[in-house]
Image (tube, rainbow, N blue to C red):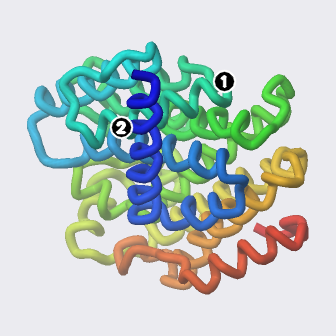
Amino acid sequence: MADLAAADAARGYRLAQHVTRAAGRTYYLASRLLPAAGRRGVFALYAYARMADDVVDEPGTPAVQSARLDVLEAGLSAALAGAAPPAVDPDTADVLAALADTVHRFGIPTDTFAAFGRSMRMDLPGDPSFRNRYASFEELAEYTYGSAAVIGLQLLPILGADVGDEATAAGAALLGEAFQLTNFLRDVGEDAARDRIYLPADHLAAFGVDEQALMADAARRRAGEPLRHAVAHLIAVNRDQYRRTSAAIDALPRRTRPAISAAARSYSAILTEIERLDHDVFARRAVVPRRRRLGHATLALSGRPITRW
């Protein structure tokens, strides 16, 4: 039975690697800079997050989506307890086995997965915690803690960081939130199509953008001048988040620091791509070319600190 569990986990790691390579190009490239065990752990964490995100985003009624999320979370609980995940397909079961192996191997706090699940349910219409508009960054933080900050905390033991150091933990959580805000800025159009607005209403309103104006821009696939100014402002906020993570990145062990440095360089470069589009978040999806991401990996391996975000 132990051999079977090990074989299932090994297959799960391979499946998770495939998911990460296909859907998380920046994370995949950065993970290649990690030692093998840590690399596999990143794959497992990413694949689970992607599966949960797909449940929420793919077509279906809220009741069906909620039930599928229940099954996924129950499967993870079973895998963590050493039991066969019930009611999931073989591929999912194997990925969950790999994730359980990662959690036990590195001592990742299991309560972080509960926080992640709560944020996923905030995207489900009909759930008591559902929200698709946020008045302020303070409101948004409830969502981004579970959707992004905890992922930074999950990575700390994989990176060999001092998980008891409060400054490092705070930096890891903030980096996760910085990545998430970059996603929100890049994906305004995709989110609007799902009737979601993750950009804080008070920051948009400061530039004369309300919900109706944003949705009108989305409908014509062109950002008006007020929204462009708001996006420029939020890019500045986002860059400040990245700047405040620099000390935590520098505090990571030398062997694993390049992976996070490369990911941070590449993800923050999405902001530059949005600027090159004159802040028109509806023009096309801002993507950092592979050659630039490879350059970021080279810089990270050289040990050069990030001096400009």
Q: Label 1, label 2: how many angstroms apart (C-alpha)?
A: 20 Å
Could you tell me which secondary element the residue under label 1 belongs to?
loop
Q: Can you give x and y, in whole percent of width and height, for residue 171 in the image? A: 76, 40
Q: Is residue 200 above or below residue 111?
A: below
On the rendered structure, is 141 left or right of 187?
right
Q: Give the position of the N terminus as an image quadrant.
A: top left
- Tell me if label 1 and label 2 are in contact, CB under 8 Å: no
**Badge 2: how crowded within 10 Å, few (<14), some, or many (20+)?**
many
Amino acid bearing label 1: Gly
| Numbered label attached to residue 227 | none
Q: Can you give x and y, in whole percent of width and height, for residue 46 in the image? A: 48, 47
Q: Which residue is mark 1?
A: 107
Could you tell me which secondary element the residue under label 2 belongs to?
helix
On the rendered structure, is 5 left or right of 157?
left
Amino acid bearing label 2: Asp
Residue 201 appearing in the image: no
Q: Give the position of the C terminus as an image quadrant.
A: bottom right
Q: Residue at x 54, y 83 (%)?
A: 289
On the rendered structure, is 303 left or right of 79?
right
Quadrant housing residue 107: top right
Q: Is residue 261 above or below residue 116?
A: below
Q: Nearer the viewer, residue 150 or 161?
A: 161
**Badge 1: how crowded within 10 Å, few (<14), some, or many (20+)?**
few
Q: Is residue 252 above or below residue 212?
A: above
Circle 1 or circle 2, nearest the eye: 2
| Numbered label attached to residue 94 | 2
Q: Nearer the viewer, residue 209 or 105?
A: 105
Q: Residue at x 68, y 47 (%)?
A: 175
Sequence-first tag of 1 and 2? 2
Q: Is residue 305 above or below residue 131?
A: below
Quadrant housing residue 159: top right
